[in-house]
Image: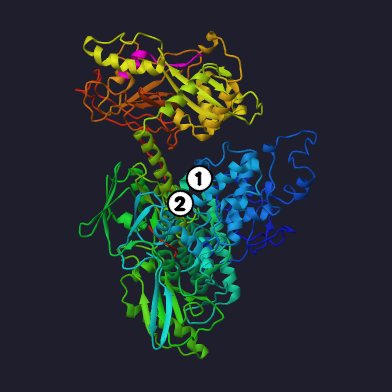
Amino acid sequence: MNPPNENQQQQILPNIHNPLQFTIVLPPSDANPNPNSSLPNPSNVNRLLSLGIPRKRRRGRPSSNQVYTLPPEFSENSLDSNDFERNPNPNFRSNQAERVDVSEEIIVINKEATSEALIALTAGFPADVLTEEEIDAGVVSVVGGIEQVNYILIRNHIITKWRENVFNWVTKEMFVDIVPSHCSKLLDSAYNYLVSHGYINFGVAPMVKDRILVENSTKLKVIVIGAGLSGLAAARQLMSFGYKVTVLEGRKRPGGRVYTKKMEGGNRVAAADLGGSVLTGTHGNPLGILARQLSYPLHKIRDKCPLYRLDGQPVDSGVDAKVEVAFNQLLDKASKLRQLMGEVSQDVSLGAALETFWQVDGEPANPEEMSLFNWHLANLEYANAGLLSRLSLAFWDQDDPYDMGGDHCFLPGGNGRLVQALAENVPILYEKTVNAIRYGSDGVQVVVSGGQVFEGDVALCTVPLGVLKSGSIKFNPELPQRKLDGIKRLGFGLLNKVAMLFPHLFWGTDLDMFGHLSDDPSRRGEFFLFYSYATVAGGPVLMALVAGEAAHSFECMPPTDAVTRILQILRGIYEPQGIDVPEPIQTVCTRWGCDPFSLGSYSNVAVGSSGDDYDILAESVGDGRLFFAGEATTRRYPATMHGAFLSGLREAANIAHYATNRASQAKLEKNPSKNSHACASLLADLFREPDLEFGSFSVIYTKKNAEDKSMAVLRVVFSGPVKKAQEGSRPDQQHTNKLLFQQLQSHFNQQQELHVYTLLSREQVFELREVKGGDEMRLNFLCEKLGVKLVGRKGLGPAADDVISSIKAERSKRKPALTSATLKSGRHLNLNKQLLYFLTCNLQNEWIITTEQLRHYRKAKILRTNNSPFSSANKEVAVKAVGSNDRSSVPQFNQNVEVKVGSSSVAFNGSSSGAAPIKSAVNGGNESISSVSMGSGPTISPNLNVGCGVTSNISSCNPPNRSNPPNIDGVSAHDSDMVPASNAELDGKMQ
């Protein structure tokens, strides 16, 4: 983001405690600097706390300007603590006479809410909205509103308290006296989320390390592939959760692409970072927090960066400034161009756009300006580890809005000190080169060179993107095509270094970097920038960088030639000043492109790619058995060391989430639920007399709490007409179908019904009731507008248990209702019984059945009522029958039905009581929900999947049976939605 214009009036926020030590500025409204970023609506950009950090174009010359835009909720005038002291109701200005329940008040935890919001921002939390991860975790019962605001205030306060002293382990009890009692559940939610996702209580402080060594009862075995920053972060976090962790590393050392080389000779000893070296931004950087915990100081990289011409003379400062301004204007024009081009810009390179403007505006006037311009292009290629001709014009800087503010820093002694601290007490097996990863429902197997096999419940793959691109690791089964395509699209660039230890310091101590120009555009990145490590390495070390096309050529350059060329440059600069340049004592040249464990340096957004591909690489596969982490899996912080570290914490949380769900499911399967049956029966009894009923929807709630925000239980009923159990049965199937329909009737109570539920506020219930267009529009409203999940009884969770208990307690005090009232059932979404019978006959195979095939069955169709959601004439039905290996004569009710109506689809799936509960997703998402409990009978899990198409084509129209399954030419697109999504150990930009 460019610094504000000096002529623009700016307001400095007064009286705000500023623990981060930066200037807070309220700039005038301007457009989003990156129109292709994934921020919300550009018109609302100024509602976010966005950091004005150095953009990638200025990686070599970091800017110190920090600009913050404050949302109204956290501005000085809108969050005045005196207002709360005078009247705790935040709505009192508009209606002072109105009295609001305490649950509707914005709580006051700390008068420094603005400062706490800024600190939370540095951890990646926006000021006034929840992150997608928080929403997925269900941190609040209703997204939006006062509850969300209070959650954010509590969350920000917890983060701030831990940041004040990162040596301590923050406990929930520290906040019990601060957070109002009516918000205790929000405190639980915020604290548990922050701990499990690694936002607090992480690192290498003694109190944190003590937690890692605690033995828990959990015996889940996790295999982490790669001991880079992402792998180490995940391993430590998983160990703190009580999991058994084994880390497999192909090298002889930890750290991956973060590698500190000890250099010595001539009584000189120094440390040089040959891989990731620069901490890009210190505001909230987790690696900066690790350094604090270890009491390691950070060295700010000074902004001074003189440039030298080919003849060794310094570039005139006026000419330097002129060319830099022209270069930035060129990038601004490229940004406007991509706005005009729209989606077409995804197929255009940044280099092509810059070249076009260069030709239109005219090339620099003289060779010196030309060389200066090429130096800036080389610096841009260094920032992205990629050639400009391969960088996406649309998305090359998509991560700019998320860059951390603060100084760019070196860690004295090298980043290897952080690696060693993270690797302490972590079980790492070195020289274990992984050749294959097998994953399935029973766990994972990781095969290393020599044929040794490691088995576990879960695997986390943190290898660099270059290794994934090479295909050197074989996955069985093969990775989904979606992930393979993402791996192919993303770019993976190259940066090399030459580290030299000299007998003495001859370049001075007043600067940390200087640059050198080239007259050859193809070699513009060759030794274009020098970093001085003299102040942090413990000796006179100078580091020369090789970027762009030159980095690839450098892979084949003999080290002696490289040293000769560097000394020629240095002597050309310093000998005219009367300074002698000695021969280096030791020189080390990197070859990251040839390293089999990296095959490159760090990722970038190549032409045809986008930030979405980072998310695709982060997705887990195998139903939560194989996970991925590393810098190439984080769309916000790619190509950085802190991005790799944070991705490890992220995947540790994802692994724990899947493990918890899997354990709960296994427990339910192992202990058939009397309680579940009792709860299901209780819910059924309560819904015999619903408090509200419309269409196929019925609602129960407590009458004593008339607030609109109070929670209610909504039930949606799918049913078919009442018929005798054996009607329509073929003689040869009477025995089997009799047992089957007896199972059905035991649950359906003489009528085939399917019940799904969700929790809504009473306000949302009333909104749903007023939706016009019948049940189809109500279903769309539920899924699209409210974004709710319809689940089985067991999927409602503890929150629903509280609501149901309250309703039961209240109704127990009422007089018994009349029998006629209790038998009231309302209208349902009708399924013809013969269709249900048809579905239950296909048990042992996975089949996809189209509407054409169903037409061979008389009355096998969806019956339409006035309010039926299945109203479109364009219907397609896909049926997926998933069977077990049981070939007994008694059929198991285990099916998956998907009905598509126009742009909407409804799917049902079920399993026998002995089978594993089936997970379902609602509204096209990947969230898993519990199956509907059907007592001792079959288990059916509805799946309302609005907007998911069905792609199937069955060539056979004969009635299917177990001995003659239909021929399958396609699969349901919904199948892919049933695989949960998750989010390379490039552990840093090698700067």
Three-letter residue code for mark 1:
Glu
The answer to which image quadrant residue 262 occupies is bottom left
Residue for badge 1: 133
Marks 2/1 in contact by CB < 8 Å: the verdict is yes
Residue depicted at x 75% and y 50%: 81
Where does residue 722 sit, x and y in percent of width and height? 40, 10
Tell me which segment is drawn in magenta.
825-839
Q: Give whichever of 795, 553 is nearer the camera.
A: 795
Count neighbours of disc 2 (C-alpha within 10 A) and say few if under 14, some if 14 to 19, many if 20 or more: many
Number of numbered labels in the structure image:
2
Is residue 363 at least partly visible in the picture?
A: no
Vertical relation: 428 (above or below) 850 = below
User: Residue 297, percent across and down?
Assistant: 54, 72
* Residue lying at 69% horizontally and 42% vertically, measured from the top left: 106
Query: Disc 1 on helix, strand or loop?
Result: helix
**Residue 981: in magenta span:** no
Q: Which residue is mark 2?
A: 650
Instruction: Give the left or right position of residue 828, taking residue 30 as reference.
Output: left
Magenta stretch holds residue 833:
yes
